[in-house]
Image (cartoon, rainbow, N blue to C red):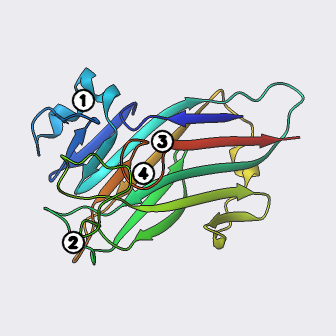
């Protein structure tokens, strides 16, 4: 089962500036005002960024009786965040599922010196991110093919009827921030993709 998560359809967030959301056509609300990220306009967002905090998405589990969860896959295009852009600006992104930390990964920069292939021409700052593929199975968690933690699919049993997927970033001495690219920004024509595999 595959669910696509549009950038702006988050159900909870707590963020600090610099922050904002943008559709394919314009910035939505005021820049660096966290309250504007709660506007109903957020469902149009194709780009989300913040300096510190978290964003959380709620999505259904489609597994039915007689189906056993074997793998979970989370795929998205992520970047760091700073004022303007900085190609050398690493950020540690933390991922949790149903309240359980599953892995961290590092985005190497807030890339802006080269234009994203899909990013609208009017947008001057962060242009694209890196594609991250997180896979959870009976052996643990892999991020882009590298082992990251011993969390397994069994840790989510018994299954609930919904998933809560959270991305967060903590304050760091250097670098930091979080950017999430939707299908109209960056280099990959997709939103966050969440997959449940079963037998």
Mark 4 sits on what residue?
167
Q: Which numbered disc, 1 or 2, marks the residue that appears first in the sequence?
A: 1
Mark 1 sits on what residue?
38
Image mark for residue 191: 3
Image mark for residue 86: 2
Label 3 sits on a secondary structure element that is loop
Q: 19 and 156: which one is in front?
A: 19
Q: Residue 63: percent from the left, percent from the top? A: 76, 30
Q: Please tell me whether mark 1 or mark 2 is closer to you in this view.
A: 2
Residue 98 visible within the image: no
Cα–Cα gap, marks 3 and 4: 14 Å
Label 4 sits on a secondary structure element that is strand
> What crowding class fits label 1: few (fewer than 14 Cα within 10 Å), some (14-19), or many (20 or more)?
some
Mark 3 and 4 residues: CB-CB less than 8 Å, in contact? no
Cα–Cα gap, marks 1 and 2: 27 Å
Q: Which numbered disc, 3 or 4, marks the residue that appears first in the sequence?
A: 4
> Horizontal placement of 186 versus 71: left or right?
left
> What crowding class fits label 4: few (fewer than 14 Cα within 10 Å), some (14-19), or many (20 or more)?
some
Cα–Cα gap, marks 4 and 1: 17 Å
Q: Which numbered disc, 4 or 2, marks the residue that appears first in the sequence?
A: 2
Label 2 sits on a secondary structure element that is loop
Cα–Cα gap, marks 4 and 2: 21 Å
Q: 167 and 118: which one is in front?
A: 118
Q: Residue 17: percent from the left, percent from the top? A: 15, 52
Q: Residue 96: percent from the left, percent from the top? A: 51, 51
Q: Which numbered disc, 4 or 1, marks the residue that appears first in the sequence?
A: 1
Label 1 sits on a secondary structure element that is helix
Q: Residue sitting at 23 percent across and 48 percent down?
A: 121
The number of discs equals 4
Cα–Cα gap, marks 3 and 2: 23 Å
Image mark for residue 52: none
């Amino acid at each position: 089962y595959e669910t696509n998560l549009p950038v702006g359809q988050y159900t909870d967030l707590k963020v600090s500036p610099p922050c904002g959301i943008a559709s394919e056509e314009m910035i939505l609300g005021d820049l660096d005002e966290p309250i504007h990220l709660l506007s109903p306009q957020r469902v149009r967002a194709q780009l989300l960024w913040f300096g510190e905090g978290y964003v959380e998405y709620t999505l259904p589990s489609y597994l039915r009786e007689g189906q056993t969860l074997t793998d979970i896959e989370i795929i998205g295009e992520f970047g760091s965040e700073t004022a303007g852009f900085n190609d050398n600006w690493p950020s540690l992104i933390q991922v949790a599922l149903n309240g359980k930390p599953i892995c961290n990964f590092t985005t190497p920069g807030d890339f802006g010196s080269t234009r994203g292939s899909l990013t609208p021409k009017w947008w001057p700052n962060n242009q694209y991110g890196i594609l991250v593929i997180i896979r959870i199975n009976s052996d643990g968690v892999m991020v882009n093919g590298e082992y990251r933690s011993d969390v397994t699919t069994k840790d989510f049993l018994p299954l609930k009827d919904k998933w809560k997927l959270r991305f967060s970033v903590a304050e760091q001495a250097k670098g930091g921030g979080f950017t999430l690219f939707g299908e109209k920004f960056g280099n990959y024509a997709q939103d966050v993709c969440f997959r449940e595999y079963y037998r």
